[in-house]
Image (cartoon, rainbow, N blue to C red):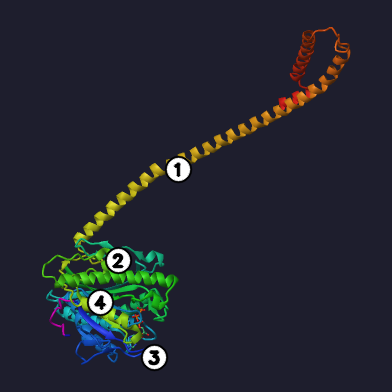
Amino acid sequence: MDTSTTVPDTVQVVVRIRPLSERELAKGYESVIVQPNPPEPRLIARNQEEFTFTEVFGPEVDQLEVYERSVRAIVLKLLEGFNVSILAYGQTGSGKTYTIGTSFAGSRLKINVGILPRALVDIFTHVNAKQRGAREEAATGNGTRYRVFCSFMELYQDHVYDLLSHRNRYERLLGIREDVGGGVFVPGLTELAVSTAEEAFRWLQHGAGCRATAPTSMNKESNRSHTIFTVIVRACLGTDDERVTISKLHFVDLAGSERAKKSRASGDRLRECIQINKGLLALGNVISALANHAKSTRNNTTYVSYRDSKLTRLLQNSLGGNSITLMLACVSPASYNLEETLSTLRYADRALAIRNKPSKSTPSASLDSGSSSGSDELERLTKTVSRLRLENTQLRRRISAELRPAVGVAGMAGGKHLLAQNRLLHGQLQASLEESTRIELRASIAENALGRLEPLVCTELSDSEFQTPDESESPEELRRKCLNVLLRYRTEYEALRQRPTAQQRSTLHKI
Ligand SMILES: Nc1ncnc2c1ncn2[C@@H]1O[C@H](COP(=O)(O)OP(=O)(O)OP(=O)(O)O)[C@@H](O)[C@H]1O
């Protein structure tokens, strides 16, 4: 692919087939992908499905060849003012990180280094050459000066982390915001000025070391997140850097798709696997929608759901935007991975149809800050900050005005209520104590009265007229006498009942 003069307006799709690993060879797995006529970019999977891409690299193709044939030319478009995105997609263990070059198992810019470190070397070689030329032209005021920055972020479990921040993991968490042009940006993301490829490479290594990786049954050093390493070039024109052009090169290492059942993931690995697949599914939907849109004869008929996941929001400009985009689809040739390989190839085949509108960044008035915004953006941000400050102050006031008294009243009301209940219960307890004591006293008085009455009754009966009943007495006369005796007993009983003993009186007084 020669893009040194042309600018591709569709997504470039390169398929890389990794070699069978030693373990796979030992187990006797065979390769199920055939390239009928290399270097023709055609391949046949499972002897039946045929695909044609921008390039197809077989297992024997090394890192340098991949870089030189497919990557270098579009990387250099960065220095012409284009935004460039390179995405590595594929099943877990298919070679994405190896190809991008963010796995540093003992190697530093050595023979097997991936495309990212090679791109850094190329960018600085060209920047330095242009700077030399600029110094010579400076006398005439026509020179362009370049400043290079890098940033590195990770999307893990749908959260964006700054991999170049010096803060702790929790404080590295960042949000995504929409910018004035409808694109997205990550406010607060660290952008470090770098002046050599080695310096940028050291930051790349540093950030890669902070990434979420874990061994899985498919890959002993599997990336559990999507990462985006960005090289930002600020080209300053004119004697006083009055005009600035900013262009960005994104290297996106997508986490590998995997089948939870096949990888036997559980716990954290399963949660990661679900999030990874969710993001990739949303990306697949965006790719399909964009591909359908490109094939459709009627314009603006397809809705592209970028907002379905943070991954698609972050890649919004790379897919269907103004960027030059290269998709590196990495596949395993082993027979036991055939389903996943076919799925990657179909995904990549759809991506081939996506049309972008690459355009050079327009120069804007210079700002001293290293950020990518112009004066409008600065004004907008200043206004946003003051609005947020005002909102913050108002919210604080409202909280102290509404919540604090409410908490106080609620606390006081609760206390009073408990106190009243306590008093009520105490009163009820006292009343029932008094009542039970009164009942006991009455019972004891009654018993006492009975004890005193008994001898009285006996005496009465012994010397009363009942002793010698008159035979001639009428029943009416007898009844009258009995009633008289009963009346005297009752009177006596009542008198005794109303007169507690001294001890009983003192008890009643105490309660
Ligand atoms: N083209 C290649 N040549 C030699 N070795 C390779 C190649 N591609 C991949 N490998 C090896 O295969 C293994 C898995 O590769 P890698 O870690 O890049 O996979 P990955 O797709 O990034 O996986 P994950 O999504 O799980 O992070 C590594 O040991 C890597 O060195």
Give me the C-alpha separation between circle 2 and circle 3: 37 Å
Q: Which one is in front in this view, the residue at disc 2 or the one at disc 4?
A: 4
Instruction: Using residue 101 as the reference point, say whether residue 318 is left or right of it.
Output: left
Tell me the amino acid under the disc marked 1: Val
Mark 4 and mark 1: span between their CA atoms?
57 Å
Q: Could you say whether the residue bearing mark 1 is in a helix, strand or loop? A: helix
| Residue that badge 3 annotates | 22
Please identify the quarter of the rendering in which residue 4 is found.
Answer: bottom left
Circle nearer the N terminus (2, 4): 2
User: Closest to the observer: 397 or 144?
Assistant: 397
The residue under the point 52% across, 37% down is 417
What is the spatial separation of the Cα atoms under label 2 and label 4, in whole angstroms? 19 Å
**Please, is residue 492 above or below residue 332 in the view?**
above
Depth-wise, is mark 3 or mark 1 nearer the camera?
Answer: 3
Badge 3 element: helix
Q: Which residue is mark 2?
A: 310
Residue 51 vs residue 483, the one in the foreground: 483
State which image quarter holds ligand 1: bottom left
Q: In the image, residue 218 lies at what x, y percent? A: 39, 81
Mark 1 or mark 2, which is nearer to you?
2
Type of the residue with mark 2: Lys
Q: Which mark is residue 126?
A: none
Residue type at mark 3 is Glu
Per the image, the residue denoted by label 1 is 407
**Residue drawn at point x = 24 percent, y = 78 percent:** 348
How much space separates mark 1 and mark 2, taking CA atoms?
39 Å
